[in-house]
Amino acid sequence: MTLFDDFQLVGDPALKAPMARYMRDQFAFAGLKTPERKRQSRELLKQSKRVTVPELVSGIETLYQRPEREYQYVAIDLLVANVKRFNFNDMQRLARLISEKAWWDSVDALRKGFGDYIRVRPADKQAVFELFNGADDFWLRRVAITLQLMEKGQTDTRLLERAILPDIATPEFFIQKAIGWALRNYSKVDPQWVMQFIQAHQLSKLAIHEGSKYLKLH
């Protein structure tokens, strides 16, 4: 038995149903709100920094497969907490989690981990981007679009364009929301680039609404 096999969350049964309803009954819940989940997993995260990377990656995958949604959150917390320890091969393996039990909460939390990774290892940015860009799974493409959210002045606009342009007419809400989100964030750094991008392409109303929040288009 490993550190991760032994780990168990203790939830409030009264919270299970309302938490599941909030997520459209797609997942079972143990019944822990975020502060309590973090309290119960604090020691696990602390100890995770002392195990080998192969054991850690395997442990993250094991926890992610458990049925209760909170275990996916703990697995993602472990990834984020240890991101400086991983190399590209580790991240390539962990990228498969994005398509499993996929919904906006897990996808966007995992995206944060990959965003943290490219800040730690900027030389791997393009390779990480290619894990997601052009994928059949729209959740992976959402990560490609939003991967650079925290890059600010280090944003590679060539990659941003490559992520957005093939999906400008995709009707999927989570794709259009991601396009707007990425543009809005980058407009804080280079509003002129974002304004020109919006004016040069036929984006959806949702993407324009989200992306132009900080711009004066008229």
Image: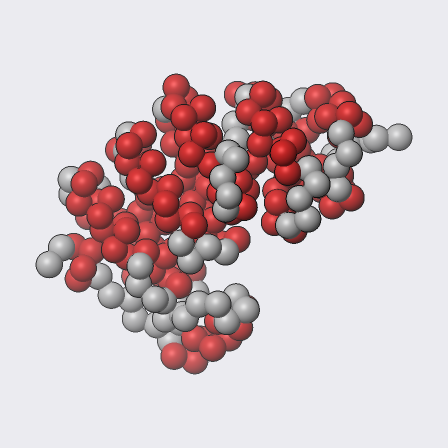
Please tell me in which quadrant of the rendered image residue 177 appears.
top right
**From what the image shows, is residue 67 above or below residue 125?**
below
Please tell me in which quadrant of the rendered image residue 43 appears.
bottom left
Q: Residue at the spot x=77%, y=34% of the render? A: 202
In this view, the residue farthest toward the front is 136
In this view, the residue farthest toward the bottom is 14
Q: How is the image coloured?
A: secondary structure
**From what the image shows, is residue 10 above or below residue 97?**
below
Q: Position of residue 128 (x, y in %)?
A: 41, 30
Q: Residue at the spot x=46%, y=55% of the render? A: 102
**From what the image shows, is residue 11 above or below residue 173?**
below
In this view, the residue farthest toward the left is 1
Q: Position of residue 155 (x, y in %)?
A: 55, 23
Q: Residue at the spot x=31%, y=30% of the render? A: 88
Quadrant location of the N terminus? bottom left
In this view, the residue farthest toward the right is 218
Q: Position of residue 149 (x, y in %)?
A: 55, 34
Judge from the rendering whether residue 11 lies leftward or rightward of residue 45; answer left or right.
right
In this rendering, does residue 57 appear at all? yes
In this rendering, does residue 46 appear at all? no
**From what the image shows, is residue 1 above or below residue 89?**
below
Q: Residue at the spot x=84%, y=30% of the render? A: 217
Task: Give whichever of 51, 204 is nearer the camera.
Answer: 204
